[in-house]
Amino acid sequence: MQNAGLCVEQRKAVYMAKYAAFSRQNVSPLAILGRCRENYNSKTWDEGVFGVYNQDLRTAILAGPAISSNQLRAIQSEIDQFLDEESQFSPVHLCLVAGPSKNRIQSCMTLAFTHLNSLQFNKVLHMHPLSSYSLLFL
């Protein structure tokens, strides 16, 4: 019984400090890991990203104690940085703002990758000007 008590104390010292934010929200880190793996295997984004952009979902999220408005803005900033978004009126941003009642997450994801591919293609064109003939072979 003494070993069991020691084990519990060790768990509190290591696990609880590292995953305190999850524990405060009564969320298991294993559940999050499972969801991440599921999304990765399905090659899709998590629909929770709509909650960062869609106003109705943001309001519902902020009504609870789990996350602050500043934290939600920080998450949006990180996503926008990944998406290389500079405009709130880009197709990707508008897709996410419209939310799950109007769009599927896969549609927004496809728009994002199309957007990122075009940005990358434009960078290549500016670095290495090509003739219109050579564009046929890209």
Image (cartoon, rainbow, N blue to C red):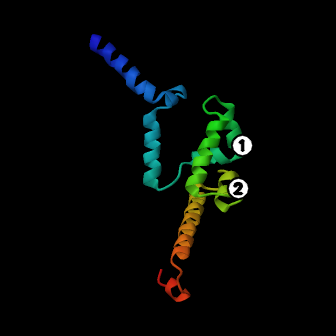
* Rendered image: mark on residue 88: 2
Report the residue that reaches farthest toward the top.
2
Q: Residues within 10 Å of mark 1 (few under 14, many from 20)?
A: few
Q: Position of residue 108 (x, y in %)?
A: 60, 58
When the figure is inspected, residue 10 is found, relative to residue 1, above or below; the finding is: below
The residue singled out by tag 1 in the image is 56
Q: Residue at x 40, y 27 (%)?
A: 15
Q: Position of residue 115 (x, y in %)?
A: 59, 65
The numbered mark, 1 or 2, whose residue comes first in the sequence reads 1
Q: How many marks?
A: 2
> Quadrant location of residue 123?
bottom right
* Rendered image: mark on residue 119: none
User: Which amino acid type corresponds to the residue marked 2 in the rendered image?
Assistant: Gln
Would residue 34 be seen by someone viewing this image from the given angle? yes
Q: Position of residue 13 (x, y in %)?
A: 39, 21
Q: Residues within 10 Å of mark 2 (few under 14, many from 20)?
A: few
Q: Residue at x 36, y 17 (%)?
A: 9
User: Which amino acid type corresponds to the residue marked 1 in the rendered image?
Assistant: Asp
